[in-house]
Amino acid sequence: MKILFTLALSSMLFNSTVNAQEIEGTEIGFDGYFGASTNGGSFTLGAKYGFKLKEYFLVGPSVRYQRTWTKNVTTGSQGAYNVFGGGVFGHARFFNALFVGAEFEMMRTPFVIQTTSGQTKNWIPTLFVGGGYSQEFNGKFRINAGIMYDVINNLGSPFRNSYFLRNSQNKLLPVIYRIAFFIPIS
């Protein structure tokens, strides 16, 4: 029920934002991640469909797929699983050099996560906020490369194997890097 409420609320906010502004065009975007070792690895592919509002803002829905595999080199046992989900995103671009953004996604994992209240769930929310470098190339495509911080930092997040930054106590921080390519459609 919480998932349906969250998706309905996101849809209403998205529709009111798009309808309140004049749409100047649309773009499709892609981002991904790949990491592997002798013990396994994962890759993820995300797609975004953005509505360009005014000159600087892009908002829209997103979908994501992730495949993870493991291999125990000692015993030879192997395993793999899939994660998928969707959400909404919003980016603001400035000076054809910078972007800031937020990306909310609900990801369905094959693992059941137990909450402190005793409930179980396998839909995990993520909310990345961040920014970085943004450059358009001759109106044909744009690259956004930046650092994103997961505000929710859920223990069941499928992005945990992508975290790369540690604090002074050597604890992983919910920070990922993201490179996205956007192509104007209209």
Image (spheres, rainbow, N blue to C red):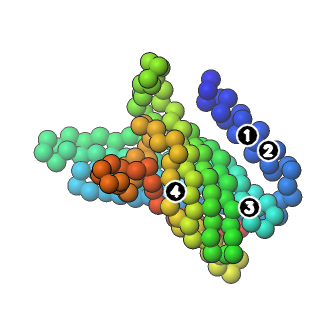
Kindly report the distance in space between the C-alpha atoms of the residues bearing marks 4 and 1: 23 Å
Which disc is residue 76 wearing?
none
Kindly report the distance in space between the C-alpha atoms of the residues bearing marks 3 and 2: 15 Å
Residue at horizontal 20%, vertical 44%? Answer: 72
Looking at this view, name the residue that lies furthest to the left: 74
| 1 or 3: mark nearer the eye | 3
- Residue 185: give x, y in percent of width and height: 73, 65
Identify the mark nearer the N-term, 4 or 3: 3
Whether the residues at callouts 4 and 1 have beta carbons within 8 Å, the answer is no
Kindly report the distance in space between the C-alpha atoms of the residues bearing marks 2 and 4: 25 Å
Asked where in the image residue 139 lies, by quadrant, the reply is: bottom right
User: Between 52 and 38, which is closer to the camera in this rendering?
Assistant: 52
| 2 or 4: mark nearer the eye | 4
Whether the residues at callouts 2 and 1 have beta carbons within 8 Å, the answer is yes
- What residue did someone put label 1 on? 11
Is residue 20 shown left or right of residue 152? right
Looking at this view, name the residue that lies furthest to the bottom: 138
- What residue did someone put label 2 on? 15
Residue at horizontal 44%, vertical 18%? Answer: 118
- Residue 155: give x, y in percent of width and height: 41, 37
Q: What's under tag 2, amino acid-wise? A: Asn
| 4 or 1: mark nearer the eye | 4
Which disc is residue 57 wearing?
3
Q: What's under tag 1, amino acid-wise? A: Ser
Q: Secondary structure at mark 4?
A: strand
Which disc is residue 148 wearing?
4
Q: What's under tag 3, amino acid-wise? A: Phe
User: Between 124 and 174, which is closer to the camera in this rendering?
Assistant: 174
